[in-house]
Amino acid sequence: MHRLRSILDSLRSSLWFVPALMIVSATALGLGLIEIDANLDRMRLQERWPRLFGAGAAGARGVLETIAGSIITIAGVAFSITIVALTLASSQYTSRILRNFMRDRANQVVLGAFVGIFIYCLVVLRTIRGGDEGAFVPPLAVLVAVLLAFVGIACLIFFIHHIASSIQAETIIKAAADETIDAVDRLFPEEMGEEADAGQSPGAPADESRWQSIAALRTGFIQGVDGEALLEAARQRRTFIRMERGVGEFIVEGAPLVGVAGAVGATDEQLTACIAAAFTIGHQRTMVQDAGFGIRQIVDVALKALSPGINDTTTAVTCVNYLSAILARLAARRIESRYRMDTAEHGGELRVIARGPTFDGMLAEAFDQIRQNAQGNVAALLALLTALEVIGDCTHDGQRRAALRGQADLIGDAARLSIPDPRDRHAAEAIVKRLHRNLADARTPG
């Protein structure tokens, strides 16, 4: 199932899949209307609606050739606009947001509409014959081509407006944040609960010499893991499996991917094949099982905004605001324990030690690099502290509140050391004190 999701995500992120479907649909529409026209009483149509269906072979050819030539020209312009927008977004923000442009369904549909109308005109055009060839003019298909030309014009106007809107910083950041929040809702659906276990679980071998490594078969980012497949492989062989790399991490071919312990001969070829099939490794991160990738995208935009060459504090603050929305949603969700147990009917024993996300890790991913690059930037540092207040209001878990207090101390130290004006330092120190006071009443929900 995780491989199917990865394939579907790849198709959704491509600029060719939706246009290809629309080309097939346009071809089918053209052929279908031609067959309908072949069985219609064309003379009655021409007599009853001469202005709609009265064109001869030469006139129909002229109309279709004009539409086809104009639409393919517009398609070339649209593709050029898309490339320019991608180039600007990559240089202004980060190359990691290019995937969001490619995933934009509006862009895919518009490009598919242009190419689909062109193909439709070609399909209909080849069936038109003059009197010497056995006259045949499909009036209904020609009328639909004219209507599709109006659709193409509307798509062009919409496309220009959409591109102008989509390259704005707020739109890019919001799109990445919305997708990340959707990933959080999908990956962590349960409401507030306990944080993932931190210590060694009873039943797992503590002696490292008992663990045998199984290496990765390819180099790339781990895009997804089939946890059920790993659990089933461990159950069948009565072994323990420990993930050495988690989703979103980079793995090198030949490096340890998992460790296996608990049975002689566990690292056989069949087990290696099962483990390799359970991991999806690709050349880039995706958000199928990796909500942290969305955070990474927004952080990269913030870092680019804070760079001396860009120096766009407003964009950086906007990034922090959306990061606070993501982490506030995550703070109220239960993160699954890293220990995967058999069901009661299979003995309820520990079988898999996963390597998954934690709230502390996601918080550090969101704020650490921004804090390090915002030295002396009063607005950015105050935005980080305000974001911690928003997140703190969404959780009562003691461990998560401790992580927020630790992050507040780090930001407070950065403000104290890098902000020269004492009044600005006092504003940051006041928020840090308020955070400690508000987060001190930590209680873990039952």
Image (cartoon, rainbow, N blue to C red):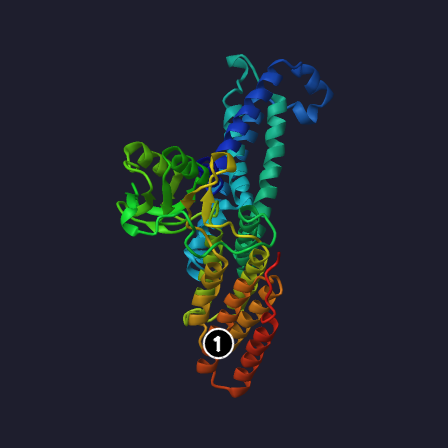
Q: Position of residue 108 (x, y in %)?
A: 52, 41
Coordinates of residue 303 in the picture (x, y in percent): 44, 65
Query: Viewed as shown, does residue 34 lie left or right of 252?
Result: right
Say if 262 sits above or below 416 in the image: above
Q: Is residue 82 left or right of residue 190?
A: left
How crowded pointer 1 is (Cα within 10 Å; few <14, some 14-19, many 20+) is rated as some
Q: Does residue 309 appear in the picture of this structure? A: yes
Instruction: State the SS at label 1.
Output: loop
User: In the depicted view, which residue is nearer to us: 439 or 35?
Assistant: 439
Q: Which residue is mark 1?
A: 377
> Quarter of the image holding residue 395?
bottom right
Q: Name the residue at 58% across, 47% down.
A: 189
Q: Residue furthest right?
A: 48
- Pick the front one: 363 or 91: 363
Instruction: Indicate the quadrant containing the C terminus: top left, top right, bottom left or bottom right.
Output: bottom right
Q: Is residue 353 above or below residue 443?
A: above
Q: Nearer the viewer, residue 363 or 349?
A: 349
Q: What kind of residue is marked 1? A: Asn
Identity of the residue drawn at 55% across and 40% down:
109
Of residue 110 and residue 66, the one placed in the foreground of this image is 110
Q: Is residue 197 above or below residue 384?
A: above
Residue 16 in the image: state x and y as whole percent: 46, 38
Question: Quadrant of the rendered structure where residue 155 is?
Answer: top right
Location of residue 313 in the rendering, given as x and y in whole percent from the top left corner = 51, 71
Residue at screen point 41% across, 70% down: 309
Location of residue 343 with respect to 413 vertically, above or below? above
Q: Is residue 82 visible in this depiction of the protein?
A: no
Query: How many numbered marks have been drawn onto this rendered protein structure?
Result: 1
